[in-house]
C-alpha cells in the first residue's frame, strides 16, 4: 500500500489542470449529471481525442479529468491490480497533469478508475468509482445498429436480450455470459456493466459510492447513483449465479474473492491468487497466509513492493 | 512475465528508453530536421494534417519524426494535441472556385473553360526506381515551363467548376443547398448520431482513413453498390481562409491552406425521387491527397442512396458501417487494446469453457463406455 504525496513539480504548465480545457470538462460534467438523473441511460457526449489510444481507457480518463480536484486521492486499477502496465501509465498521466496524490489503497482513494474489476473492499459514499467501458451498448452484439438499439431502449424493448439468455439455457443449461453480464438498473434500463466478471455484478447493487461509466471511442457516458438497484438479468427458475472458486487465494488465503489463475511451469501446475492486488497485500500484512505464500519465487516478487 | 505482480512502472520506463533509442537509430547519421520532413515528405505531412484534423505542417513533421514514420501514430499524436487547443470560432465557407490552381484536370471534357493543368503529379511517370536519388544526387533541375497564367493580366478571379457548367443544362444535379438556418454539424464537438446529414458524413469522410476509404471506393467500382463514376474534376491549389470577427464586423483573412477537391460525376437513370441526370459525389481534403479525395467522393455518392431513391445492398452504402469505422485513431486504438491484459475476463472464459467441455463429454460419451465406467 503506497500513497505518493502530491507531486506539484511534475505538473505540466503547458496543459490545463487534468489536460482537458474547462469548456470540455463542463460539457462532460453535464453529461455526467444527465447520466445520474437517468440511471443506466447512455448519454451521448462529444468525446475528445486523448493522449492515450481509444480502447485504452479514454472514456474513464475523460470522466476522471472532469471530476478530479486537487484534493482528490486517485487510485487506478486494471484487472484489479495497480501495477499492470496501463494502470501505471494512466496514474502517471494524472500525476503529471494534476499533481494530485495517488494511492494503491482502496480505502484511502477518493476516486478509483478501473478497468474490468470492482475492488473487493466495500466502497463508501465519499468515493467515486469510474469504469472504463469498451462497448457501452448491452444490445450491440444482438443488434449492431445504433439507430435500432436506441429505439429498443426508449421503448424498454428488451425481448431480444431475454431470448438470448433463454437460448443459452436451452443450449447449455445455463447462461453462458461470464463477464459484461447485463444488468437492469433502477428497474428501467438494461446496462452493460463493462467487462467486469459477473462475480462483481452484485457489488454494484445499492453501492454507496457513485459509479460512472465512460466509453470514449463510442462517445457515451452513463451512471449509477449511490444506493440504486442493480439486478443481473436472470429467470426465476434459472437465477443469476456469480463465479465460485474451489480454492482460496494461494498467497493470502482469502475466500469469496475473484482469483486469477497463474501458470507456474509448462507441466500444468498453477496457482490461484487474488485479482485485487491491494486487497491481497492488505490481508498478508494482517498476517493471513496462503498455502503458497512462502514460495521463494513469489516472495521475491513481493519483496520488490 | 509481462504483467508482473510488481515492477510494471520500471518496465514501462525501460520500454520508453528502448523506444527513444530505436527512434533515433544510428547516431552516426544526422538526425532528421522537421524542415526536411515538411519539405521532402510533404505527402506524408498532408495525410497526417488531414486525418489528424490539424492544419500545421511543422506539428505534423514533429509527429512524423516522433512516431518514427508511423503515419497513423503521427495522426494520433496530432489529434491528442488538437484536443487541448481552444476553439475560437468557425471560418467562413471556403470558395474553391477561387482556388489558386496548381493542378486541375477533368476526365470528361477534352478542354474546358480554365483549361487542363497537369501540375505536380505521379500520374504520368514511369514507376522506375530512380537511382540518382539513391546516390543522393538530384536529377538536373528541369527547366519548368508552365503556361503563364500566373503572370497573365486577365487571369480570371476564379475558375468555374465543371459541375457548374453541366448544371446550367439541367443535366447535372445542382450544388446541394443548405438551409440558411441549418447549423453545420461538427462531430468533434457533438457526438455523431444516426441518421447523419451529409455535412456530418463529409466531415467524417474527410477525417477518415485513406486506406479504408480507398477500399470502400474500390468496392463500389467492382459492383458492390455500383455508381458509374467519372472524374468530373480534380483540383489542387491554395484557398484563402477567412474568419468573421464579430467585434470588427468584417471578415479577416487568416492565411491560405492547400486543398485537394474532387467532383465525381455519376450516371443516374432516375428514380421515383429524382429525374434522370448526372449526380455527384464530393471529396475535399486538406493538403495534397488526390487518392483520398477521389475515394471520398465515391463513398459520399454511395452514401446518398436514400436521398436519390436507390436500393442499398453494399457496405459502402451503409452509413452506420462506413461512418462508425472510418476513423483510424479509433480503429487502431481498439484493435491494439487487445494487447492490454485481459486475464480477468479470460479467467471467466476459462471457467466457462471447462464447464462446457465437461457437459460436452458427458453427453457425447458412448453409452457402453458409460456403462463400463458405471460397472468398474
Image (cartoon, coloured by chain):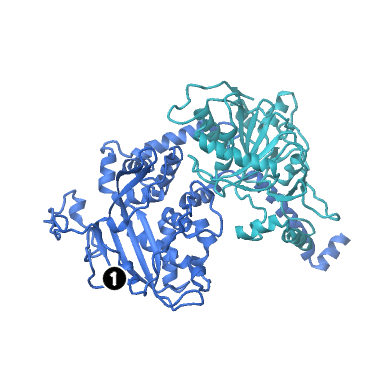
Mark 1 = which residue? Answer: B107
Across and down, in percent, residue B53 comes to 41, 47
Q: Position of residue B330 (x, y in %)?
A: 50, 50
**In front of the other: B157 or B214:** B157
Residue B247 image position (x, y, % from top left)? 38, 37
Q: Residue furthest right?
A: B375
The residue at the point 70 percent across, 24 percent down is A285
Q: Is residue A132 left or right of residue B358?
A: left
Is B310 positioned to the left or the right of B124 in the image?
right
Nearest the viewer among B344 and A192 is: A192
Q: Which chain is blue?
A: B
Q: Colour of chain A?
A: cyan
Q: Is residue B167 visible?
A: yes
Viewer-nearest residue: B314 or B361: B314
Along the viewing direction, whichever of A192 and B164 lies nearer the viewer: B164
- Above or below for B376 versus A33: below
Residue B111 picture quarter? bottom left
User: What is the secondary structure assignment of the residue under circle 1?
Assistant: loop
Which part of the image, by quadrant, shows the C terminus of chain A? top right
Above or below B78: residue A305? above
State left or right for residue A188 relative to residue B79.
right
| Quarter the N terminus of chain A occupies | top right
Answer few, some or many: residues within 10 Å of disc 1's Cα (few below 14, many 20 plus, some between 14 and 19). few
Amino acid at each position: 500500500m503506497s500513497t505518493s504525496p502530491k507531486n506539484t513539480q511534475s505538473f505540466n504548465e503547458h496543459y490545463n489542470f487534468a489536460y482537458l480545457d474547462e469548456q470540455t470538462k463542463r460539457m462532460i460534467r453535464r453529461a455526467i449529471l444527465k447520466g445520474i438523473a437517468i440511471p443506466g441511460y447512455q448519454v451521448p457526449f462529444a468525446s475528445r481525442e486523448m493522449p492515450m489510444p481509444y480502447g485504452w481507457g479514454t472514456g474513464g480518463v475523460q470522466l476522471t479529468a472532469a471530476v478530479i480536484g486537487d484534493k482528490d486521492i486517485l487510485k487506478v486499477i486494471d484487472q484489479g491490480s495497480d501495477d499492470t502496465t496501463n494502470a501505471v501509465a494512466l496514474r502517471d498521466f494524472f500525476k503529471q497533469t494534476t499533481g494530485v496524490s495517488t494511492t494503491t489503497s482502496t480505502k484511502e482513494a477518493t476516486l478509483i478508475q478501473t478497468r474490468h474489476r470492482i475492488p473487493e473492499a466495500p466502497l463508501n459514499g465519499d468515493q467515486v468509482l469510474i469504469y472504463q467501458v469498451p462497448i457501452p451498448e448491452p444490445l450491440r452484439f444482438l443488434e449492431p445498429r445504433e439507430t435500432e438499439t436506441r429505439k429498443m431502449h426508449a421503448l424498454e424493448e428488451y425481448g431480444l436480450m431475454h431470448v438470448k439468455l433463454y437460448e443459452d439455457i436451452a443450449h447449455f443449461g445455463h447462461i453462458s455470459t461470464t463477464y459484461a453480464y447485463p444488468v437492469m438498473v433502477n428497474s428501467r434500463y438494461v446496462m452493460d456493466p463493462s467487462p467486469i466478471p459477473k462475480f462483481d455484478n452484485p457489488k454494484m447493487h445499492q453501492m454507496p459510492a457513485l459509479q460512472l461509466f465512460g466509453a470514449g471511442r463510442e462517445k457515451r457516458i452513463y451512471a449509477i447513483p449511490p444506493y440504486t438497484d442493480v439486478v443481473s438479468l436472470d429467470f426465476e427458475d434459472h437465477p443469476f449465479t456469480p463465479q465460485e472458486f474451489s480454492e482460496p487465494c494461494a498467497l493470502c488465503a482469502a475466500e469469496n474473492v475473484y482469483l486469477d489463475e497463474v501458470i507456474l511451469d509448462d507441466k500444468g501446475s498453477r496457482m490461484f491468487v487474488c485479482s485485487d492486488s491491494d486487497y491481497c497485500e492488505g490481508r498478508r500484512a494482517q498476517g493471513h497466509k496462503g498455502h503458497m505464500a512462502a514460495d521463494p519465487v513469489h516472495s521475491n516478487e513481493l519483496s520488490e513492493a | 512475465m509481462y504483467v508482473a505482480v510488481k515492477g510494471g512502472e520500471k518496465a514501462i520506463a525501460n520500454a520508453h528508453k528502448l523506444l527513444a533509442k530505436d527512434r533515433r537509430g544510428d547516431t552516426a547519421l544526422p538526425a532528421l530536421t522537421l524542415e526536411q520532413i515538411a519539405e521532402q515528405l510533404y505527402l506524408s505531412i498532408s495525410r497526417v494534417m488531414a486525418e489528424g484534423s490539424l492544419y500545421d505542417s511543422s506539428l505534423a513533421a514533429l509527429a512524423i519524426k516522433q512516431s518514427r514514420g508511423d503515419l497513423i501514430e503521427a495522426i494520433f499524436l496530432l489529434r491528442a494535441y488538437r484536443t487541448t487547443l481552444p476553439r475560437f470560432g468557425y471560418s467562413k465557407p471556403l470558395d474553391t472556385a477561387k482556388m489558386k490552381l496548381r493542378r486541375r484536370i477533368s476526365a470528361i471534357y477534352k478542354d474546358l473553360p480554365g483549361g487542363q493543368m497537369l501540375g505536380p503529379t505521379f500520374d504520368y511517370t514511369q514507376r522506375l526506381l530512380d537511382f540518382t536519388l539513391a546516390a543522393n544526387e538530384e536529377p538536373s533541375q528541369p527547366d519548368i515551363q508552365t503556361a503563364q497564367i500566373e503572370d497573365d493580366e486577365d487571369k480570371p478571379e476564379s475558375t468555374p467548376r465543371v459541375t457548374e457548367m453541366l448544371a446550367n443544362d439541367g443535366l447535372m444535379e445542382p450544388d446541394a443547398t443548405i438551409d440558411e438556418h441549418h447549423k453545420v454539424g461538427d462531430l468533434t464537438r457533438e457526438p455523431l448520431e444516426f441518421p447523419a446529414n451529409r455535412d456530418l458524413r463529409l466531415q467524417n469522410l474527410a477525417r477518415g482513413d485513406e486506406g479504408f476509404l480507398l477500399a470502400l471506393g474500390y468496392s463500389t467500382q467492382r459492383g458492390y453498390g455500383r455508381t458509374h463514376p467519372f472524374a468530373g474534376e480534380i483540383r489542387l491549389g491554395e484557398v484563402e481562409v477567412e474568419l468573421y470577427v464579430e467585434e470588427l464586423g468584417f471578415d479577416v483573412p487568416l492565411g491560405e491552406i492547400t486543398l485537394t477537391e474532387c467532383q465525381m460525376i455519376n450516371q443516374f437513370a432516375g428514380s421515383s425521387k429524382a429525374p434522370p441526370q448526372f449526380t455527384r459525389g464530393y471529396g475535399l481534403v486538406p493538403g495534397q491527397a488526390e487518392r483520398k479525395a477521389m475515394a471520398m467522393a465515391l463513398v459520399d455518392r454511395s452514401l446518398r442512396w436514400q436521398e436519390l431513391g436507390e436500393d442499398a445492398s453494399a457496405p459502402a452504402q451503409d452509413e452506420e458501417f462506413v461512418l462508425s469505422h472510418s476513423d483510424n485513431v479509433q480503429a487502431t486504438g481498439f484493435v491494439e487494446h487487445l494487447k492490454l491484459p485481459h486475464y480477468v475476463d479470460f479467467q471467466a472464459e476459462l471457467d466457462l469453457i471447462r464447464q462446457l467441455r465437461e457437459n460436452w463429454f458427458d453427453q457425447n460419451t458412448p453409452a457402453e463406455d458409460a456403462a463400463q465406467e458405471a460397472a468398474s
